[in-house]
Amino acid sequence: MSKPKHERTLAETEAKAVTRNIRVSPYKLNLAAGLIRGKKAQDAVAILTFSKRRIAQTVKATLESAIANAENNHQLDVDRLVVSKVEVGRAIVMKRFHARGRGKAARVEKWFSHLSIVVAEKQADAEPAQQEAA
């Protein structure tokens, strides 16, 4: 009585990693995610390693998980991996109150985010053809 298997949503040359409920606003997470969109996987890890943003370490951990999934679960070549898609989404919003003067209160919203990273194996044959065309 197990659940029925569903079709794989990604291509055979892609692997995915997801981190949910990260305690940072989606805007700030998207700034860090934008640093690695379209980059080679190893270059993206290096960029995140030396980034000054606090959330870069969480993005790096998710990226390394996607690379490990590609290598171990889908037998993809790590040296040819490219960050093909990085999605940032809204999660829950914790609502708190901050005491203000004269008995009033101000609302404080603490945003959470979801992060999804897809890495794809780039074909080695595509590079020489593009260089010849240029």
Image (cartoon, rainbow, N blue to C red):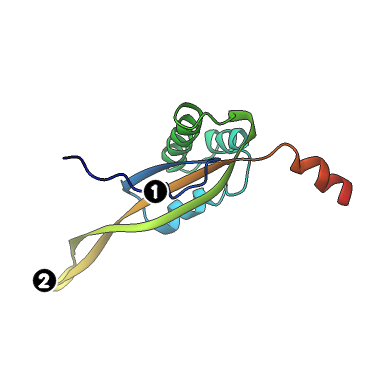
Q: What's the residue at 50%, 33% (across, down)?
A: 70
Residue type beneath disc 1? Glu
Q: Residue at x 26, y 62 (%)?
A: 109
Q: Is residue 74 above or below residue 35?
A: above
Mark 2 closeness class: few <14, some 14–19, many ≥20 residues within 10 Å: few
Q: Is residue 98 above or below residue 20?
A: below
* Residue 22 position within the rendered picture, expressed as x and y whole percent measured from the top left: 33, 47
Measuring 77% from the left and 42% from the top, which residue is drawn there? 127
Residue 90 sits in quarter: bottom left
Residue 37 percent coordinates (x, y)? 58, 49
Residue at the limit of the structure toward the left, as seen here: 103
State left or right for residue 119 relative to residue 19: right
Q: Is residue 41 visible?
A: yes
- Secondary element under disc 1, as helix, strand or loop, is loop
Q: Nearer the viewer, mark 1 or mark 2?
A: 1
* Few, some or many residues within 10 Å of mark 1 (<14, 14–19, 20+): few
User: In screen coordinates, is 34 left or right of 68?
Assistant: right
Report the front residue among 56 and 39: 39
Q: Is residue 134 visible?
A: no
Circle 2 residue: 103
